Amino acid sequence: MYKPFFSRRLVSDAFVWAATLTLCSAVSLAQTGAAASHQLSPKAEQGQPIEAYIHAAWDELSRSMDDCKSVADPKLATVPILYLPKDVAEPLEIAALEKSCKVKVDRLPRRIEQLGEVRPSEIAHSGLLYLPNKYVVPGGRFNEMYGWDSYFIILGLIQDGRDELAKGMVENFFYEIEHYGGILNANRTYYFTRSQPPFLSSMIRAVYDAESSAGHKDRAAAWLPRAYGYASRDHALWLSDFHKAGDTGLARYFDLGEGPVEEMADDSTYYPDVIRWLLGHPEVKTDFLVNGPDNPDAAAQVELAKTSCDPHISYVCAHAHVDGHWLSHDFYEGDRAMRESGFDPAFRYGPFSGWTHHNAPSGLNSLLYKYERDLAWMAEQLGKPGEAKHWNQLADRRRAAINKYLWNPQRGMYYDYDFVAGKQSTYDYLTTFYPLWAGAADLQQATAVEANLKVFERAGGAAMSPYETGVQWDLPYGWAPVTWLTVEGLTKSGDTKDAVRISEKFREMVKQNYACDLSIREKYNVITASTEVNVASGYKMNVIGFGWTNAAYLKMGALIKNSGEPVQPVEIPRRDCTMPASQ
């Protein structure tokens, strides 16, 4: 298994090489996308309290099929196209959208039963996939409904009293399962080959509990059979052969597509940057590079399609080479799997997570453990004891496999498992707290993980890892969704004091930065407690919005209020508001 070769210092050598990259003189797609992203981001008024900003942002981030801004795609410079399922009658609002927004409406080529049955390459022009209900997008360049972002957004909506909007989003996921083969990374045609972390059962339980608490128990009970059916179908996706992590009994992330992902067209330097990094670090042994001409003829293109990617059919592939070096076919498989995981990118599975598909992640399998317990609960509510027993047996087997392959009693943490190499990872990652959140850790395990909180805790909350790699899902960055799962996991295991402290740090960081630039961001530098972002490669922007940060801020506030713990003021670095925020 790949081991981190870099130090835990604050300035990564990855930043050094990134600073030497040649700047393009032409206006790039990334610049175009950044401008469009800014236009799609919520704006705060001077003096507006942060809670009021978040409350208003839900509407500003809402999209629907009668709203022109819903079809815009900052990631691709293309004419807006809206696709309908092959076998669904055209809804009334679509004709109005086509006329008022100058949007082309088209049909998918055939009915889709399973994920991957229609490949993006079969669709001449990328576009938005129809969804029947209003939904909330993360913000900026992410102008569609995402698979795992939506769980946290739904929690925030419910916390803010927007239960119907939250339920409509869950119904949209049912629609995706019915008409697009499964829950997609997001509702764009270029996401047809992968899903995202499986949170559907948790979304269903959040909506069910909200309706029940609001005095609508009968309505919640009447909805549950429908929800249970779709959750069962979604869970089955993760038992598919392509999601199996060898013979471990665990799951992995995997994308059914090939080559570089289309949505990276707005960051045309990403894959060349990966190549430059690999060339600049020959001591890091990988199989990620293959040789090929920079200007391949027809015969060379055929060979590259086998060993790397097909430059004939992929614009991104055609530009993904440096001095006769291309990325390998296996790297692209790992790169795509990384994007299904949502952690795009980190270095936890080798440089730029190029071996993601070789690993059984502790986070994914914790989510599936909870999913199986949730399905057992639903079956019990519906009077199906035999099915409840089945789900509980699946959960028991998964927990046994988690303990066998992912738990490290000597280090007191959960790690990922490289089932190809047959080795457990040594890469400390914040997803070690997922089993606490999922209920998969026993008391002894939870206590040991809690003792390792110091590995990740920083001024602004919790960092994703203790390794500075120059990419956004490692140090110095902290992210709202994983921080929330961490603090809720601590709370569930009885460590309320640590949960409150991390929550207070995170909220104070978000609040101080909001006071400076009147925005809430996708990610934060938890060492400087600021929006300062110096990402060497990957998504270099720090998008304004931002759905899951808004949600985590609200949920952590409620956790602190209900904890019974005395509120202790936290000391974090004070941001100089005269310094501009990262864009």
Image (cartoon, grey):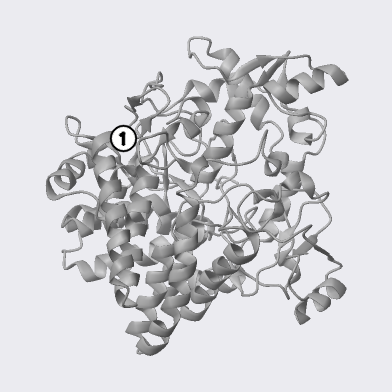
Residue under numbered circle 1: 415
Q: Is residue 313 above or below residue 284?
A: below
Residue type at the position of mark 1? Tyr
Q: Does residue 195 lie above or below 389 as drawn?
A: above
| SS for callout 1 | loop
Q: Is residue 144 above or below residue 397?
A: below
- Residue displayed at 40% across by 82% down: 220
Figure quadrant of residue 248: top left
- Residue shown at the point (60%, 68%) measured from the top left: 175
Residue 156 seen in render: no
x then y, percent, for residue 460 = 35, 47
The furthest residue to the left: 444
Q: Residue at x 51, y 54 (%)?
A: 521
Image coordinates of residue 576 in percent, x first then y, are 46, 47
Instruction: Name the quadrant of the N terminus.
Output: top left
**Image location (x, y in percent) of residue 368:** 37, 52
Relative side of 18 to 219, left or right: right
Label 1 CA crowd tier, 10 Å (few <14, some 14–19, many 20+) = many
Looking at the image, residue 149 sits to the left or right of residue 246; the answer is right
